Image: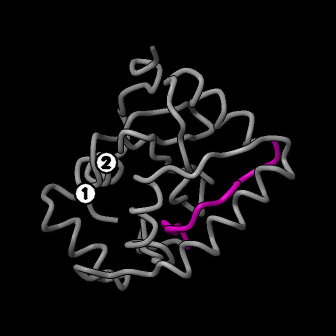
Amino acid sequence: MPVLKTPEEVDAWLSNAGWYPGRRCADLAAAEVASVLQDFLDDGGSLVVIDPALDFLREHVGLVAPRHASTDDRVEFNPRLMYREAAEDVQEIADGLAKNIFPVAHDTYDGGTVLIDEVGRFFYMHHSGNYFLGDEKYSALMNYSRGYPLEDAEDYYV
């Protein structure tokens, strides 16, 4: 994944993965959402489906974009529970934000999860910590592509 510096570069990166303006995959998004809701229940947690996440997934679900050309590290735009007891970690972030959050993407190398809150902000849950990515898709993906340092999610806790 190159460092994305403009919305146009974000669009180009997503386009290489199959995205295009106006893309809508409502049925696939609904199936993925139903699957992750069950996964969270099985992990002892629960999720609330929120409009910003559902809107994002309808447009981006199913895309797979490379993070690094030399590895199998990819960003998969599907809501996933990436490890056991992740439901508890997601709930901890939601509690801190005092907002519902929902997973919308993950990376395959580290198992980091991209989450959206109910006001449309993006966060990144990673084994090294929880981070704020941005207030909307473009700033979030530009920050994600740049990597560390990222703002700590706790800076956004109430």
Q: Which residues are magenta?
A: 72-85
Task: Name the image quarter holding the N terminus.
Answer: bottom left
Question: How would you rate the neighbour count of disc 2 (Cα within 10 Å): few for under 14, some for 14-19, many for 20 or more?
Answer: many
Inter-mark Cα distance, 2 to 1: 12 Å
Q: Amino acid at mark 1?
A: Val
Is residue 77 part of the magenta span, yes or no? yes
Q: Amino acid at mark 2?
A: Ala
Side of 43 relative to 154 (left or right) = right
Question: How would you rate the neighbour count of disc 1 (Cα within 10 Å): few for under 14, some for 14-19, many for 20 or more?
Answer: some
Identify the secondary structure beneath mark 1: loop
In the image, residue 90 sits, relative to residue 157, either above or below, namely: below
Q: Residue at x 59, y 61 (%)?
A: 79
Q: Residue at x 57, y 52 (%)?
A: 49
In the image, residue 72 sits, relative to residue 127, either above or below, namely: below
Which residue is nearer to you in this view: 130 or 87? Answer: 87
Give the main secondary structure of the magenta stretch. Answer: loop
Judge depth for marks 2 and 1 and give the one in front: 2
Identify the secondary structure beneath mark 2: helix
Where is residue 153 shown, x and y percent of the image? 45, 27
Q: Which mark is residue 3?
A: 1
Disc nearer the start of the sequence (2/1): 1
Is residue 153 part of the magenta span, yes or no? no
